Amino acid sequence: MARGLAGSVTVVDGESSPFCFPRRYRMPMNELEMFLSAWDREAESTVKLLRALPVTQYDFRPDAGGRSMGELAWHLAEGDAYMSCGIEAGRFAMDAKPPNIERPRTVEGLAPGYERIHRDAVARIRKLKPEDLDRSIPFFAGQQVPIRDILWNMIISHGIHHRGQLTLMCRLAGGHAPGLYGPNREETAAMRAGARA
């Protein structure tokens, strides 16, 4: 049985599967709860990938001008931290720095660091009320952006985008990126072998 970020068992109706979602993801009552549920699922996938990164490849950089694997991995935590802090402050400022955002310098430190940052970010967002999603706040360039758009686009979509990059980087660095929205090639091969047996 797998355990989620909050320690919940990801077994549904007695079935254990990497593709089942626990009941707590099934029936959100409002959009804010729906966001928090989706965010928790995505965070669990992020942690799964961070734990699969090759431990000796922190500085792996397929593009000399791009982020290293460790830097890109930590950017996932930074997204949660900066967006949630900006929402909590009611504005975004280039000089604002979330607490405890220093990047771990080893692959082994990335997953636990991300989990800590994500928990803090969730605690900030849980202070919102469903009606707050309609409220707009000034973003970095001063434009007014609804909190709803920050949650869905700049936390969820932005994180998925960079996690996709990190998945490819993991493979390029010699790692085995886990299946996140379905089985990866190794998991597929194991399922086929099991079906033939």
Image: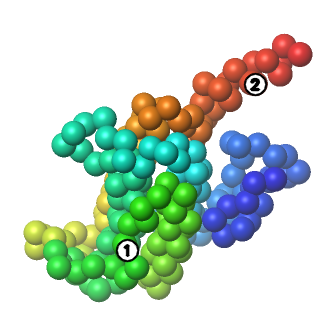
Q: Quadrant of residue 78?
A: bottom left
Element marked by disc 2: helix
Q: Circle 1 sits on which residue?
A: 101
Q: Quadrant of the C terminus?
A: top right
Which dot, 2 or 1, sits closer to the camera? 1
Residue placed farthest to the front in the image?
56
Residue placed farthest to the top in the image?
196
What is the spatial separation of the Cα atoms under label 2 and label 1, in whole angstroms? 40 Å
Instruction: Inspect the image, locate mark 1, and give the three-letter code of the amino acid beneath it.
Output: Ile
Examine the rendered structure and indicate whether residue 88 appears above or below residue 121. below
With 77 as the anchor, is 12 left or right in this view? right
Give the crowd class for mark 2: few <14, some 14-19, many >=20 residues within 10 Å. few
Q: Label for residue 183?
A: none
In this orientation, which residue lies closer to the viewer: 180 or 14?
180
The numbered mark, 2 or 1, whose residue comes first in the sequence reads: 1
Instruction: Inspect the image, locate mark 2, and give the three-letter code of the amino acid beneath it.
Output: Met
The reply to whether the C-beta atoms of the residues labelled 2 and 1 are less than 8 Å apart is no
- Residue at 75% x, 18% y is 192
**Residue 83 % position (x, y):** 33, 70
In this orientation, which residue lies closer to the viewer: 129 or 113?
113
Q: Quadrant of residue 142?
A: bottom left
**Residue 9 % position (x, y):** 77, 60
- Residue at 40% x, 79% y is 100
- Residue at 84% x, 13% y is 196
Give the crowd class for mark 1: few <14, some 14-19, many >=20 residues within 10 Å. some
| Viewer can see residue 81 | yes
Examine the rendered structure and indicate whether residue 35 appears above or below residue 128. above
**Residue 8 % position (x, y):** 74, 65
Q: Circle 2 sits on which residue?
A: 191
Element marked by disc 1: loop
| Viewer can see residue 122 | no
Examine the rendered structure and indicate whether residue 149 appears above or below residue 142. above
